[in-house]
Image (spheres, grey):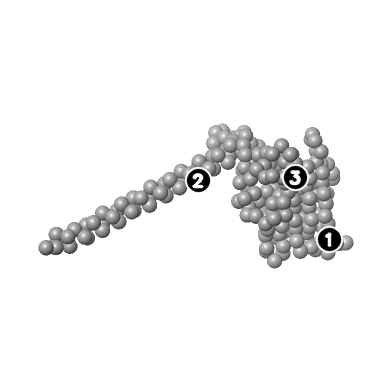
Amino acid sequence: MRLIRLELSGFKSFAGTVELPFESGVTAIVGPNGCGKSNISDAVRWVLGEQSPRLLRGGKMEDVIFQGSTGRRPVNVAEVSLVFDNSDGSLPLAYQEVVVTRRLSRSGQSDYLLNRSPVRLRDIQDMLRGTGLGADAAVVMEAKMIEALLSEKAEERRALFEEAAGIGLYRDRKKSTERRLEETAVAAWRASVARRSASTRCAPSASASP
């Protein structure tokens, strides 16, 4: 699996439709201050499901929609897509090319799409877990992530390395299974208590029968 293209439309400073191709190797984006470099990393974070406007350098989620400028009117919809080459079958989909899209309108309607078909955010996150693009992965490195790597807290370093190594999915599945087992144990205990209580109430009636 390889990222081959980033498509933006109406996202922050990208008023029109822009396609950024990524060739094999390392791609560097350079430019003067204020040209929109950080908006590209924000777009990657956003399309992967970021829910915090603060981490996207905004006050509310609608701030990601192009607000207008001297020569351009505001737009009503922001849309970002990540296009992956899946010819190696890394993603569990029968497509050579996989497109992950997020769309937001000023009315507040938010949509996630997988190859242009509506899906839930959870569906996208589950698909990407184990690839290094999971919700907790170091896809966009920030100062706080570097601090976590250098932290004396082993659990913080472990969480980052586990996600980057692609085992975060199995860790989450383990937690989910353990939670369901606990819920089942509680339900079984309550059923047992209810059965004993019912037996106690029925006992006098049974003894009073001729």
Tell how many labels: 3
Counting from the top left corner in percent of width and height, residue 16 is at: 83, 57
Element at label 3: strand
Camera-nearest residue between 69 and 1 = 1
Type of residue at label 1?
Answer: Ser
Residue count near mark 3 (Cα–Cα under 10 Å), binned few <14, some 14–19, many ≥20: some
Camera-nearest residue between 105 and 41 = 105
Is 165 on the left-hand or right-hand side of 31? left
Q: For marks 3 and 1, give the CA distance.
A: 35 Å
Q: Are marks 2 and 3 in contact (CB under 8 Å)?
A: no
Is 27 on the left-hand or right-hand side of 158? right
- Nearer the observer: mark 3 or 1; the answer is 3
Q: For marks 2 and 3, give the CA distance.
A: 31 Å
Residue at (75, 61) in percent of width and height: 77
According to the picture, the residue beneath numbered tag 2 turns out to be 176
Counting from the top left corner in percent of width and height, residue 7 is at: 79, 50
According to the picture, the residue beneath numbered tag 1 turns out to be 69
Residue count near mark 1 (Cα–Cα under 10 Å), binned few <14, some 14–19, many ≥20: few
Counting from the top left corner in percent of width and height, residue 30 is at: 83, 41
Residue at (63, 52) in percent of width and height: 121
Query: Can the viewer see residue 46?
Result: no
Element at label 2: helix
Is 177 on the left-hand or right-hand side of 49? left
Type of residue at label 3?
Answer: Glu
Tell me which label, 3 or 1, sits earlier in the chain. Answer: 1
Q: Is residue 72 above or below residue 26?
A: below
- Nearer the observer: mark 2 or 1; the answer is 2
Element at label 1: loop
According to the picture, the residue beneath numbered tag 3 turns out to be 97
Counting from the top left corner in percent of width and height, residue 35 is at: 83, 49
